[in-house]
Image (cartoon, helix red, strand yellow):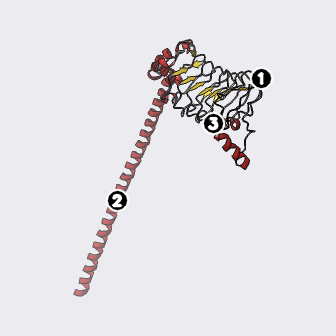
Amino acid sequence: MRLAPQPSALLIVAVLLLSSGVIASPRLSSGCPDRCVCDEQLVVQCAGQHLSSFPEDLPLATRQLIISNNFIAELPPLALNYLSDLVYLDCSNNSLTEISQSTFGNLRKLAYLDLSFNILTRIEDRTFGPLDSLVMLRMTDNPFLSEIHQDAFAENVALQVLDVSRNNLTMLNISSLISLPALRSVGLSGNPWSCECGSEELCLWVHLEDFKFQDEGQTVCSSPDDLQGRRLAEAGIELRTLCHHTLGSWDYLFFVIIGFVIFASGTVLAWVMGVIMVLYERYIKKKDEQLELDGEEEGAAESGRTARTGNEHENALLKHTV
């Protein structure tokens, strides 16, 4: 049975805008999409209807939309963002390959979002940024999901439950997660976590905030071999010691090379300075000798002038006497 909700102010405004040509939109309807069931509580149920595309003609006042167990490959932002009153969205078990910030650009009231059992590969920067009211996000069982941007959840200050279990995550930057004030439950199990030094922060977070991880016992390392099967919380303690207090063979080789370079540079610098000092001393000595020689020549010239002056004086006296 399909029940049409009463026309809302939003619907009237949208129709007026469309009639004036201000905005473009998919065909609007106050009815119910084909193969879906709508009730007077503004719930639209389209689960398991073999849909290959997002349902059309959704009531604009829809508050809950369930499109799980279909073959939908894309969430069209233009159609989805007209549902500004949407609070609950279940897209699980479809064929979604990507989502972006524009996908949820106008869903300010959305509190529950389920993207589980799809084929997502990565989550971009601030993908969920517009979702100011998001409280629960389920994103499990995406076998190709290997990357979540460190700022994907940076603006979701209302987020309380996050589940990214059973994906293909090997690392997760938690810089934005640890600053979320309302976060109280996180699911990480079933991922092939790499417990290298780059995951130290994640492992320590699991260790320190273990009460947030209901599946902490199943959240284990897949690599390296010596930590395979170890709980992330345990690995965090070992990484704290391993990554900050031990040096590997490459570190020692680096120090040897640096020491040799410093020694060689010092030796070359000392040799250059020695050569400069020797040349400078030779220059000073040669300059002093030249000054002495010039002084002697000047003295000899002065003596010659004095002798000539004396002879001229004697000659003058003889001439005067005669």
> Circle 3: is it few (<14), some (14-19), or many (20+) Cα within 10 Å?
some
Question: Which residue was labeled with disc 1?
Answer: 50
| Cα–Cα span, label 1 and label 3 | 26 Å
Labels 2 and 1 touching (C-beta < 8 A): no
> Circle 1: is it few (<14), some (14-19), or many (20+) Cα within 10 Å?
some
Classify residue 146 by image quadrant: top right
Classify residue 75 by image quadrant: top right
> Circle 2: is it few (<14), some (14-19), or many (20+) Cα within 10 Å?
few
Question: Which residue was labeled with disc 2?
Answer: 291
Residue kind at label 1, given as amino acid type: His
Q: Nearer the viewer, residue 18 or 114?
A: 18
Say whether disc 2 or disc 1 marks the residue closer to the N-terminus: 1
Circle 2: element type: helix
| Cα–Cα span, label 2 and label 1 | 108 Å
240 sits left or right of 135 in the view: left
Question: Which residue was labeled with disc 3?
Answer: 84
63 sits left or right of 69 in the view: left
Q: Nearer the viewer, residue 233 or 176?
A: 176
Residue lying at the far left in this picture: please name it: 321
Nearer the observer, disc 3 or disc 2?
3
* Residue depicted at x 63% and y 36%: 84
Where is residue 110 shown, x and y percent of the image? 60, 31
Where is residue 105 shown, x and y percent of the image? 63, 37
Residue kind at label 3, given as amino acid type: Ser
Say whether disc 1 or disc 3 marks the residue closer to the N-terminus: 1
Q: Nearer the viewer, residue 191 or 77?
A: 77
Residue kind at label 2, given as amino acid type: Leu
